[in-house]
Amino acid sequence: MGAYEALFMEQGATFKTLAEMFAKDPTALPSDFVPHHEADQTASMVLEKLHKSGVYQFGVRVHKAGDYPAKLRDAKHPVELLYYQGTWELSEMRGIAVVGSRKPSQEGVRRAARIAKELVARNFAVVSGLATGIDRAAHTAALRAGGTTIAVIGTPLGEHYPKENADLQDLIAKQHLLISQVPVLRYAAQPFQQKRYYFPERNATMSALTEGTVIVEAGETSGTLTQARAALFQGRKLFILDSCFQNPAITWPARFEKEGAIRVREPEDIVKALVD
């Protein structure tokens, strides 16, 4: 953990540059690139920061060590370390991401809830990013249906964004599974404007952790489309609700359909595509 955080504190470090560095030496661990004393010192700083944020119980998953999920290596720039709170074994369930706009229509919220309930009924974990709008609707519906939900967030553990989802985030961390790839110290040192770049990165990780992504509702420039591109690159299923195709204000649904996305008219279309 300390070595990973230390690498991210180096000038110019990004998920891309670190992924490329580790790709050159498939056997390397973060600790191979950082002196032991520096790693220990950095780890102590991380623990102090997490404790100040109220995080005392958490785990890590490091590539090539322990229960790191092999499916993450399908990402274009796979992460070397994940932080988590909750029950890690839930990551081994069959999971589907349900994502979309932060400012959806009321019908979009209802559609997200319906999809989540249908997935729970078929023993899928509902995965999303704990944003406002569609993400919150999907997580909440899964919980109300008595199912499992996994949140992949774009902030470090202990940080709540948006603030109105703090209670939901804490509930998922205690009773389900909360995952973050965001380096604690780097995040704390960055200006607010730069912190938004972690969200597209987490979208790629969320896609890799699941069998497919369902886009409920999204605008032409929505960050959700980052996950759509990641899903297709990773060989995951990409599902787009038919209502998106009926929206004359956007062109992306037809474009992604040509690239292999699946149009969803009924929730059963998702399950059928996963079985075929």
Image: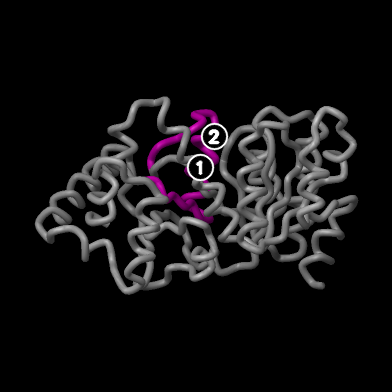
Q: Is residue 222 magenta?
A: no
What residue is at 51 percent from the left and 47 percent from the top? Answer: 202
Placement of the C terminus among the 4 image quadrants = bottom right
Q: Position of residue 110 (x, y in %)?
A: 80, 38
Q: Nearer the viewer, residue 129 or 245?
A: 245
Per the image, label 1 sits on a secondary structure element best described as helix
Q: Position of residue 62 (x, y in %)?
A: 36, 64
Q: Which residue is mark 1?
A: 169
Amino acid type, mark 1: Gln
User: Can you name the residue that lies furthest to the front here?
Assistant: 24
What residue is at 86 percent from the left and 60 percent from the top? Answer: 268
Amino acid type, mark 2: Asn
What residue is at 64 percent from the left and 40 percent from the top? Answer: 224
The crowding category of the residue bearing disc 1, from other C-alpha atoms within 10 Å (few below 14, some 14 to 19, many at least 20), is many
| Mark identifier at residue 73 | none
- Report how far apart the C-alphas of labels 2 and 1 lie in the structure: 6 Å
Q: Is residue 169 magenta?
A: yes
Q: Quadrant of residue 54?
A: top left
Q: Quadrant of residue 187?
A: top left
Give the residues in magenta. 158-182
What residue is at 27 percent from the left and 57 percent from the top? Answer: 1
- Determine contact: label 2, label 1, CB under 8 Å: yes
Numbered label tally: 2
Q: Position of residue 269 (x, y in %)?
A: 86, 59
Q: Which residue is mark 2?
A: 165
Relative to residue 242, is residue 102 drawn left or right? left
Per the image, label 2 sits on a secondary structure element best described as helix
